[in-house]
Amino acid sequence: MTMLRAELRADRVTLGYGRRPVVHDVSIDITEGGVGLIGESGSGKTTLARAFLGLLSPISGNIWYGDQTLKKADMRKFRRDVQPVFQAEALDPRMRVGTSIAEALPRAARSRVPDLLEQVGLDPELAGRRPHELSGGQRQRVVIARALAVGPRLLILDEPTSALDVTVQARVLDLLASLDTERLLITHNLAVVERLCRTSHVLFAGRVVESGPTADLLANPAHPYTRALRDAVPKLGGDPPEAKGRTEAVPAATGCPFRLRCPLAVAACEQAPEPRDVQGRQVACHRAEDVLT
Amino acid sequence: MSDHLIEARDLRVSYGGRVVAEVPRLDVGAGECVAIVGESGSGKSTTLLSLLGLTQNAEISGQVRVCGVDVLTASPRALRELRGARAALVMQSPHAALSPATRLGVLMRRALKLHGVRDVDRTMARAMEEVLLDRELLRRYPHEVSGGQAQRFAIALAIALGAEVILADEPTSALDVTVQAEVVGVLRRLRAERDLALLLVSHDLALVSTIADRVLVMKDGAVVESGPAATVLAEPSHPYTRELLEALP
């Protein structure tokens, strides 16, 4: 089945709370095949997700939805097209899960609750349960069912599996991969992006430091931060992951934000690197060629 | 029994007659790392807590010795001394273990005095250095440090108190990968340098494979497989272990 593309994109957005920007001049197109947003706590990835959902207005720049900015778009239609999937804690603990899902549906369509539960691999009988009576994986499926209720074209997924055990996580990832929607996936888990996203953006201190095809990024990173992230993932039977540099070094206020943590930093890094094309991807690093070799 | 720092035999923990964890045999020697793996509800955290007598309202049977203390029969005082100093617990959420209204330095100083540690200043400085933390952090409140720093502080506290055993329950699962690598690096180094016995509870098999000598796989309260980490993870004999390994993303 062919899908209409959900045309959502960030065009040079700067985002923040109060006067302090936490995301700087970021442009991201949500293209087909899934888009991943990777970064550590505090990198600005959830702030970007909030902006993509129209929950936070940019300080500068625009979020475009089709040929309109979100400020001018028909938000009723937008909310049907673009749905968030957060961690399962987002369910109302007092509400039966069937009611939680039904709330998202027009009155006439509430009989669809059992179908939706089946679609996410849950027994329709579970509709009468409350969240605490379900396992973590089941709760996450309920959150997905509720997002699917309005027939969205795009899901914005914020760490959808990070609270789950590996076996449960694997099944939820299978489910997400099987859905007929576009997706923006926010995570610090590189293996998850590899599975669900054709394109990825790596965020550090509110700036995109590397963008490109996910497979290339992980196989052969061009930014030292992408490489550090990849090398920190423990591999079964592999060498223990090594921490390179001090992770608590604060992002530099001027020049390249990663330079205080970067093993390759040189004097030139005191000048902020502009994103440039290196072997089919965009990299903001003066030393990308040295990272690649 | 022998000279293992943690030794459990026929350990059985139940709540209201329902068995939630049953471990026939668990040994951790000095300088050794043993990991308990399994999914939520498998009984791995219950096992870990029961080793320090920290399960509430549970019926426990069997034999448990930690640093030579018979945990199931020890007096409350002996247990307090064991937990405070020789055997340290590192939890998943380091911030939950730290009082939010107390500066880290005050907290550490208080704990050291309580346990009669002499030369407090030097001990504190050395412990912070060993976990690669700046001493300046001692002036901060818990909310002013990152998750990785708080976790390393918890380890520093254990070392300052002279811990011989560290029991860690998912110590890095709330942390980013780069920070996780740093915390694991600190644990590995301390284990080698100080001959620490490390009991690690984790659902991350890949992580476990890089640090543990031996592994116990738990499912529904029972140990379904155990042995050297390299063997169990490379050639699992139980279908559940295989399922866990195949689920790795």
Image (cartoon, coloured by chain):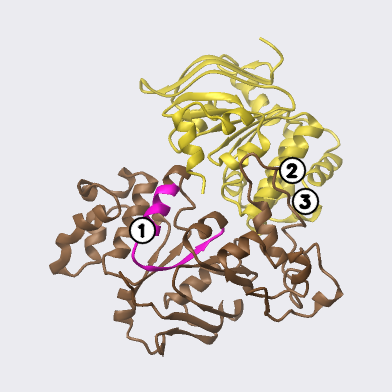
Chain colours: A brown, B yellow
Check contact, mark 1 vs mark 3: CB within 8 A: no
Q: Given this view, does label 1 or label 3 mark the residue nearer the observer? A: 1
Q: Quadrant of the N terminus of chain B?
A: top right
Is residue B86 depicted above or below A293 in this figure?
A: above
Whether residue A180 appears in magenta in the rendering, the answer is yes
Is residue A187 depicted above or below B118 in this figure?
A: below
Where residue A245 sits: x, y (%)?
77, 57
Which numbered circle lies on residue A178? Answer: 1
- Splitting the image into 4 quarters, where does residue A207 fall? bottom right
Residue A189, can we see it?
no
Hey, what amino acid is under mark 3? Answer: Leu
Whether residue A33 sits left or right of residue A118 in the image: it is right
* Residues at marks 1 and 3, CA–CA distance in whole angstroms: 45 Å
| Residue interval drawn in magenta | A169-188
Q: Chain of mark 3?
A: B
- Nearer the observer, B18 or A148: A148
Element on which disc 1 rests: helix
User: Do the residues marked 3 and 2 share a common chain?
Assistant: yes
Hey, what amino acid is under mark 2? Answer: Val
